[in-house]
Amino acid sequence: MTAPFKYAVLASGGGSNFQALLESADRGNLSAEAAFVASNNSKSGALEKARAAGIPAYHISAVSSVATRLLEDHGVHAEDPEERVSEALLLLLKTHPVHLLVLAGYMKKVPDAILKHMKNRVVNIHPALLPDFGGAGFYGERVHEAVVRERRAFSGMTVHMVNAHYDEGQVLLQRRTAVDPADDPAEVGRKVLRLEHDSYWRVVKGFAHGEIVPTGSSDPARAVTVSEDWQRRMRLLPGTVFP
Ligand code: GRF
């Protein structure tokens, strides 16, 4: 038997994307194990969902007791708040090694030390068709409000590699959904989220099956290579814009 493909999740909110990954595995669509979930938000639904599924769940903030204990147990001394978070996350990744770090609604910046440790192995999902409605200030409802304000005929989701510049990494999968003139931001959000839930697992599976392969390149446009076959299959899905 080959070792299972493992991923870790960073999330801040409800955790429906994480849940969708778990369900994909339950349905037999995705053969991958969540090694742990970490959140900056102690009340994150993602942590609750992880605990319910028996997956290690960690509340990691500069002052959280979990982070404090982790740092103490490993003899890591850090005073600076950002450094405490960075070191605590790094310890988690060292104690639960994973192939892929999956950001699923993580509202904090991923520390540089983590990007270095997980070079070209960090993915994010964004609820819009990047580069539109991406970057600083575009998160949560704000994205969908802007789409409605600009009367866009389409919105969608983007799964992309993460680098030091927010929402600018190599795009892996992008799918769109029609926006009806009568849709309010909440309705656009629901449509986009449905698309997200049907998409993220396909990318994780691409990594798990060696169809998306991290490179050693420091060029953000070449973080991974993607097989022709995977791209061809993604193009057959409804709404695929990229690849
Ligand atoms: C999703 O819309 C995702 O695109 C964005 O944050 C939201 C997270 O939702 N990055 P959930 O916590 O997975 O339900």
Image: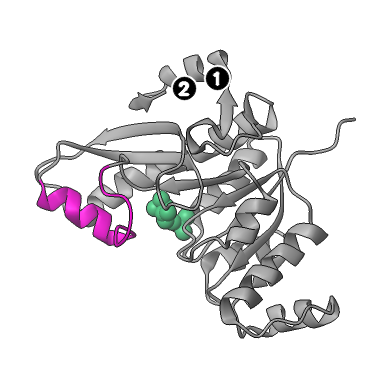
* Whole-percent x, y for residue 118 in the image: 67, 49
Between residue 232 and residue 165, name the one nearer to us: 165
Q: Quadrant of ligand 1?
A: bottom left
**Disc 2 versus disc 1: distance between alpha carbons?**
6 Å
Residue at figure coordinates x 54%, y 60% from the top left:
110
- Marks 1 and 2: in contact by CB < 8 Å? yes
Whether residue 65 is situated above or below residue 187 in the rendered picture: below
Quadrant of the snapshot with the N terminus = top right
Q: Secondary structure at mark 2?
A: helix
Residue at figure coordinates x 63%, y 74% from the top left:
83
Q: Amino acid at mark 1?
A: Trp
> Label 1: which residue?
230
Extent of the magenta region: 132-150
Circle 2 crowding by C-alpha within 10 Å: few under 14, some 14–19, many from 20: many
> Label 2: which residue?
234
Circle 1 crowding by C-alpha within 10 Å: few under 14, some 14–19, many from 20: some
Residue 63 placement: quadrant = bottom right
Q: Visible in this render: residue 29?
A: no
Whether residue 211 is situated above or below residue 134 in the rendered picture: above
